[in-house]
Image: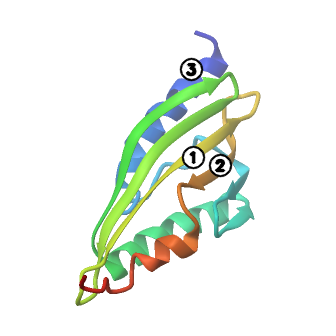
Amino acid sequence: MDEYQSQVVKAIATLKEDLPTLFKKDISYDIYRKDIFFKDPVNQFKWKFNYRIIFWTLRFHGQLFFTQLYFDLHDVEQVAPDMILANWTVRGTLRLPWKADLFFNGYSNYKLDETGLIYEHIDTWDREPKAILKQFLPQSET
């Protein structure tokens, strides 16, 4: 196996290990370039320092606002020579009297440079952020 492919194997193994626990503990940052670009439906930024902050923020807000919060990782695979795709579901229960449930699916598209390091991470969600936030509102009795 060449050096590039062994780095890709390492990246996939690291993602499989890190993502399911990202709301509980920090991830490993050695598979990412220092100038990593991140984008999801509500955030967009560059640089590993900011990438570290977004994961810290996810853990902090997860513990503050949720009694339960899970990142269910369904699959991580190399879908092209320079791309890894992760499919996942976020689900949880908000710390509210009506115990609102949060649930949405998404996928993360990771692009790899010529050394096999991740230089871009784009998240796509199965619904708009406004639709996700509506899950927090009390459900009317019908």
Instruction: Give the residue number, with chain letter if any, for mark 2.
Output: 121
Residue occupying image coordinates x 51% and y 72%? 131
Instruction: Give the residue number, with chain letter if any, for mark 1.
Output: 108
Residue occupying image coordinates x 41% and y 47%? 18
Q: Position of residue 68 (x, y in %)?
A: 26, 69
Label number found at residue 82: none
Mark found first going from the N terminus, 3 or 1:
3
Instruction: Tell me the element at label 3.
Output: helix
Is residue 98 shown above or below 113?
A: below
Instruction: Tell me the element at label 2.
Output: strand
Q: Position of residue 133 (x, y in %)?
A: 48, 77
Contact check, label 3 and label 1, Cβ < 8 Å:
no
Q: What amino acid is at disc 2?
A: His
Check disc 3: other Cα within 10 Å, few if <14, some if 14-19, many if 20+.
Answer: few
Name the residue furthest top: 1
Mark found first going from the N terminus, 1 or 2:
1
Is 120 displayed left or right of 25 in the figure?
Answer: right
Foreground: 70 or 57? 70
Is 78 displayed left or right of 91 in the figure?
Answer: right
Instruction: Give the residue number, with chain letter if any, for mark 3.
Output: 6
Name the residue furthest bottom: 97
